[in-house]
Amino acid sequence: MPYLFLFTGVIIGGVIFGWLKYKKQDTNRRSEIPLKKTGKRIIVYFDKCVIKTRDYFEEATSNTMPSRIDMLDSLYNPNQEMNKVKKSVSVIMFNWMGGSGRQIEFRSQPIYMPEESLHAYLENKKETILYVDPENFKRYYFDIEFLYSDPR
């Protein structure tokens, strides 16, 4: 009987945690819409930006069963290298001189695409718009939706 109460409490706690996390993501997504309507528009030229890229490796997943040899090898050496896939994540950094004379750095959302592809997109597009809350420069939206919607 006490396990039933514990199990019920864990389920209710998980549901509440999931709902709060979803609500936070939904609020962040909705906050960029008013910035597009009411925020200060700053034109960002990509030739004046810095692109920072980091590479990492992710284990390749397979939908097939491993071969018998692979299974035996993993028993012999569990720390062996698995199939790794190289991935890249980039951000676009833009420095803007504010009205008070101080320099403000803006960073785009993480961009998950190969560095060469990103450079090709940015070379093609040349510029985008940065929407900034005039009251709080920490609230901004770097408009890079063209990276995901351009059918090139």
Image (cartoon, rainbow, N blue to C red):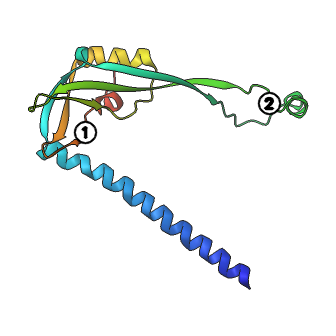
| Label 2: which secondary element | loop
Crowding at label 1, few (<14), some or many (≥20) Cα neighbours within 10 Å?
many
Name, please, the residue furthest toward the left: 99
**C-alpha distance separating marks 1 and 2:** 42 Å
Question: Where in the figure is residue 20, as x and y percent of width and height?
Answer: 43, 63
Left or right: 44, with 77 as reference point: left
Rendered view: 9 above or below 101: below
Viewer-proximal residue, 22 or 9?
Answer: 9
Viewer-proximal residue, 130 or 105?
Answer: 105
Quadrant of residue 131 in the image?
top left
Locate the C terminus and report the quarter of the image it occupies: top left
| Residue named by callout 1 | 141
Quadrant of residue 4 in the image?
bottom right
Left or right: 74, with 82 as reference point: right
Question: Where in the figure is residue 42, as x and y percent of width and height?
Answer: 14, 30
| Residue named by callout 2 | 79
Locate the N terminus and report the quarter of the image it occupies: bottom right
| Label 1: which secondary element | strand
Question: Where in the figure is residue 16, as x and y percent of width and height?
Answer: 49, 68
Left or right: 106, with 89 as reference point: left
If you read the primary sequence from the N terminus, does the residue marked by circle 1 or circle 2 appear first?
A: 2
Q: Amino acid at mark 1?
A: Tyr
